[in-house]
Image: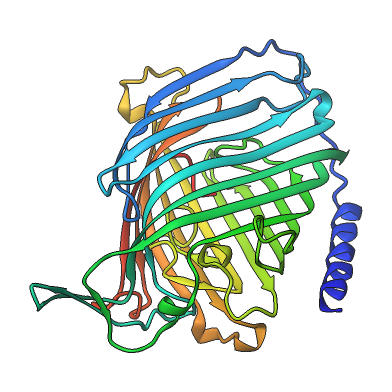
């Protein structure tokens, strides 16, 4: 009954957004558009991966057959290894047909991963001791672990009106070969021990995307709203053993301010409704990482529901689209950002004191002006004193592409 009520409420939300999203695209003068290829060494750093080495290939092409009012399509291929022994390979794509009648997007990724399990909840309170030759070596509030993971998220959308798309979604995730690090002892029982890590889930549902950004890589004006309704069912013992309903909403607004500067703001909620004691670990909403609430290790906070806000102010410095790649001072920018979010088991657990906030500063170097592809360096500082046993956490991120 609860699923049906939630579905009706969110259907009303979709229809409401559809009725108000009536912006008309401005006419542009026809210009010839060329395909572009960018191949870069995928050198990056995040606290979750350490230093990475590999390749990134971005292919930008005109699937719209010369229709200059349609955006260019983009496919990105990535393959990296890391100093933590991780391996990742995958593809991301966003495709637009002529007049943007259809939009296809997705991500397919395989990861041989080394990660941390903080358990479930808005405060990582687990205490784990590491022993070596019967002596205490270190203390942690997480369990380090190895896994293998496969994720596939696909969406096929039909244009309802300019910038507004509705369609079908598929979300498949599989985690196997879970292996906790050795010589770790739990001081007391915790959800780190109880929540399953291995697990296979399959969800299908409906999605709504409203995209009026001026650029999909680094927008300076426009609106982006994405809403997903997914039902994960126990289709069979070999496909999925988890039943839950997932509602996801990501709303962003970009404002041009002084000259070429911009303000980006974001609201995000990720919700799960189920009757199970625990879902597989990677089925929960989480805080942290290189893309959302930078400054906390990804997954420091996980639970059924997430509510978060984010803002970033972007200041280009002496940028010149005609500059050469080696003219560093003509391709730089400075970004300031702040984020806050919290996770909770149910909405009854919401409290103002539960928000986990981070602040930070970042530098940018433009690799490709037409597509606004940036090399990103961010330093995020988490303000919650309970993020680590030593107190507050922080993160250094060296990556290609914006957080949002």
Tell me the quarter of the picture where residue 398 sits.
top left
Classify 119 as above or below 26: below
Q: How is the image coloured?
A: rainbow
- Quadrant position of the N terminus in the picture: bottom right
Classify 398 as above or below 38: below
Q: Nearer the viewer, residue 45 or 24?
A: 45
Residue 303 picture location, percent across and down: 55, 74
Answer yes or no: is residue 394 visible: yes
Answer yes or no: is residue 161 visible: no
Instruction: Name the residue at 71% across, 69% down.
Output: 244
Residue 360 picture location, percent across and down: 37, 59
Instruction: Name the residue at 45% across, 81% down.
Output: 191
Residue 64 picture location, percent across and down: 76, 20
Left or right? Give the position of 250 relative to 188: right
Left or right? Give the position of 347 relative to 235: left
Tell me the quarter of the picture where residue 9 sits.
bottom right
Classify 7 as above or below 141: above
Number of numbered markers = 0
Instruction: Name the residue at 28% across, 87% down.
Output: 187
Q: Nearer the viewer, residue 375 or 335?
A: 375
Left or right? Give the position of 300 relative to 240: left
Instruction: Name the residue at 55% across, 16% down.
Output: 36
Q: Nearer the viewer, residue 204 or 235?
A: 235
Residue 348 picture location, percent across and down: 65, 88
């Amino acid at each position: 009954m609860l699923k049906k009520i939630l579905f009706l409420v969110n259907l009303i939300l979709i229809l409401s957004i559809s009725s108000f999203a009536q912006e008309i695209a401005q006419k542009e003068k026809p210009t010839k558009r060329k395909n572009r290829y960018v191949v870069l060494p995928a050198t990056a750093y995040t606290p979750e991966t350490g230093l990475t080495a590999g390749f990134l290939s971005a292919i930008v092409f005109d699937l719209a057959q010369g229709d200059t009012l349609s955006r260019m399509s983009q496919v990105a291929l990535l393959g990296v290894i890391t100093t933590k022994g991780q391996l990742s390979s995958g593809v991301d794509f966003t495709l637009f047909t002529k007049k943007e009648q259809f939009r296809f997007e997705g991500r397919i990724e395989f990861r041989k991963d080394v990660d941390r399990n903080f358990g479930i909840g808005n405060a990582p309170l687990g205490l784990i001791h590491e022993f070596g030759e019967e002596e205490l070596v270190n203390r942690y509030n997480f369990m380090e672990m190895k896994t293998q993971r496969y994720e596939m998220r696909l969406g096929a959308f039909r244009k309802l009106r300019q910038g507004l798309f509705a369609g079908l979604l598929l979300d498949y995730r599989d985690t196997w070969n879970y292996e906790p690090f050795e010589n770790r002892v739990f001081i007391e029982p915790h959800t780190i021990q109880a929540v399953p890590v291995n697990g296979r889930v399959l969800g299908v549902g409906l999605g709504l995307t409203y995209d009026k950004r001026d650029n999909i890589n680094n927008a300076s004006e426009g609106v982006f709203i994405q809403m997903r309704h997914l039902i994960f069912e126990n289709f069979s013992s070999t496909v999925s053993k988890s039943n839950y309903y997932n509602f996801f909403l990501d709303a962003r607004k970009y404002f041009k301010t002084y000259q070429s500067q911009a303000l980006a703001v974001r609201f995000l909620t990720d919700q799960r409704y189920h009757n199970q004691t625990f879902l597989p670990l990677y089925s929960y909403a989480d805080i942290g990482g290189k893309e959302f609430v930078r400054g906390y290790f990804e997954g420091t906070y996980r639970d059924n529901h997430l509510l978060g806000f984010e803002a970033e102010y972007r200041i280009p410095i002496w940028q010149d689209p005609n500059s050469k790649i080696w003219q560093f001072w003509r391709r730089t920018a400075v970004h300031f950002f702040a984020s806050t979010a919290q996770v909770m088991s149910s909405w009854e657990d919401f409290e103002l004191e539960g928000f986990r906030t981070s602040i930070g500063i970042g530098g940018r170097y433009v690799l490709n002006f037409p597509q606004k592809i940036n090399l990103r360096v961010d330093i995020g500082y988490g303000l919650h004193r309970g993020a680590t046993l030593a107190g507050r956490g922080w993160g250094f991120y060296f990556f290609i592409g914006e957080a949002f």
